[in-house]
Image (cartoon, grey):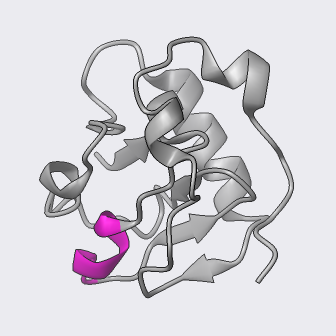
Amino acid sequence: MAYVVTEACIKCKYMDCVEVCPVDCFYEGENMLVISPEECIDCGVCEPECPVDAIKPDTDGDLERWLELNREYAAKWPNITRKAPSPEDADDFKDLDGKFDKFFSPEPAKR
């Protein structure tokens, strides 16, 4: 089992989760984070840190799509080990549904 980042992270990217991860298994895209399922040790400390409830155990319902997305982009995006500032407009997007089709970017973070 592993934890995965879901659609709620898109355009929010608060990163509180990154600070508490003991194995540094978060990877940063242009507008969301993902967790490497191969590196995640299933400790669960990241889940309660997410203010938009975007992190879920991969056994929680129908999350196969998100497990695969996390696996794919963890291999492409840069690892992030420290919290960085969230987007200035993150609060404007935190309660939106259907963000993947409208806003997901496959691009890595540009820092």
Q: Work out whether residue 6 can be spotted.
A: no
- Residue 83 placement, left or right of 103: left
Q: Is 26 situated above or below 42?
A: below
Q: Position of residue 10 (x, y in %)?
A: 58, 39
Image quarter hosting the N terminus = top left
Please count the marks in the image.
Answer: 0
Q: Which residue occupies 50% across, 24% down?
A: 64
Q: Is 67 situated above or below 97?
A: below
Q: Position of residue 107 (x, y in %)?
A: 86, 56
Observer-nearest residue: 22 or 18?
18
Q: Position of residue 108 (x, y in %)?
A: 80, 64
- Residue 25 placement, left or right of 34: left
For residue 24, what is the image quadrant? Answer: bottom left
Q: Is residue 26 magenta?
A: no
Q: Which residue occupies 70% across, 59% down?
A: 29
Residue at the right extreme? 107
Q: Position of residue 91 (x, y in %)?
A: 43, 41
- Residue 26 placement, left or right of 65: left
Image quarter hosting the C terminus = bottom right
Q: Work out whether residue 11 can be spotted.
A: yes
For residue 57, what is the image quadrant? Answer: top left
Q: Is 86 situated above or below 99?
A: below
Q: Main secondary structure of the magenta part?
A: helix
Observer-nearest residue: 25 or 55?
55
- Residue 52 placement, left or right of 34: left
Q: Which residue occupies 27% across, 28% down?
A: 59
- Magenta residues? 16-22
Q: Which residue occupies 55% across, 56% down?
A: 33
Q: Is residue 18 magenta?
A: yes
